[in-house]
Image (cartoon, helix red, strand yellow):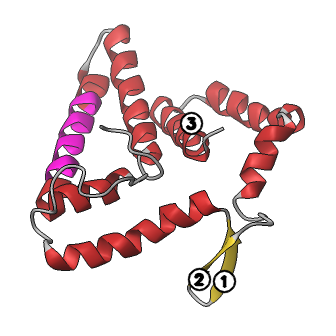
Amino acid sequence: LSRSSMIAFTAGMVALIYYTKSKFLFTVLLLVCLVGYVIIPPQVIARINLTFYSAYGVPIRIGAKTLMVDKSTYERIHIWNKIGDVMLISPLIGHGVNAFRVIDSQPARLLAEGGIIGLGLFIWLMRRIFRQAQRVFHKSDDWIWKAFGCGYSAVLIALLFHSLGAATFI
């Protein structure tokens, strides 16, 4: 029931529809969303609602508005405040592996452990991998390689979205 996984799945499907330009896939995804709302187990809906309607919520200020969010969501937002403080001490190279006990955000973990240089190298690597998958997708004449390039691109996008709320690439 990971909310990051739900967001990642959605991002991956949107990417897949965008790359394939498939009206059939779009229609299937739309139907799954519409029918899914009716057949989704109550536990999943409760987990999603827990994010913003928690009786044991923690107040967090976003702009001029204060929201009550569950502790998990609070930690994922609050970690960026901690990372900001840490970046003042060692912004370029970070503090090394396992400098912090738990960081449930890959970009935040990369900044804390590897600094701006580490995050920059990660972005460079992800960009290279993505461009290679796109090259295979667009330049291949064989359908299997086209499918591989398209699927690999969509999965990489899904993993990058997932990494915003989890330590995905460790």
Give percent across and percent down for residue 60: 60, 78
- Secondary element under disc 2, as helix, strand or loop, is strand
Q: Amino acid at mark 2?
A: Arg
Q: Is residue 67 left or right of residue 13?
A: right
Q: Earlier in the sequence, mark 1 or mark 2?
A: 2
- Secondary element under disc 1, as helix, strand or loop, is strand
Q: Earlier in the sequence, mark 3 or mark 2?
A: 3
The residue segment tinted magenta is: 121-134
Quadrant containing the N terminus in the rendered view: top right
**What separation in Å lies between label 3 and label 1 (alpha carbons)?**
29 Å
Q: Amino acid at mark 1?
A: Thr
**What separation in Å lies between label 3 and label 2 (alpha carbons)?**
28 Å
- Secondary element under disc 3, as helix, strand or loop, is helix
Give percent across and percent down for residue 6: 61, 41
Magenta highlight: main SS = helix
Query: Residue 98, labelled with which disc?
Result: none
Label 1 sits on residue: 66
Label 3 sits on residue: 9
Q: Please identify the residue farthest to the right as the structure is shown.
A: 38
Label 2 sits on residue: 61
**What separation in Å lies between label 1 and label 2 (alpha carbons)?**
4 Å
For image coordinates 81% across by 34% down, the residue present is 36
For image coordinates 43% across by 33% down, the residue present is 154
Q: Quadrant of residue 90?
A: bottom left
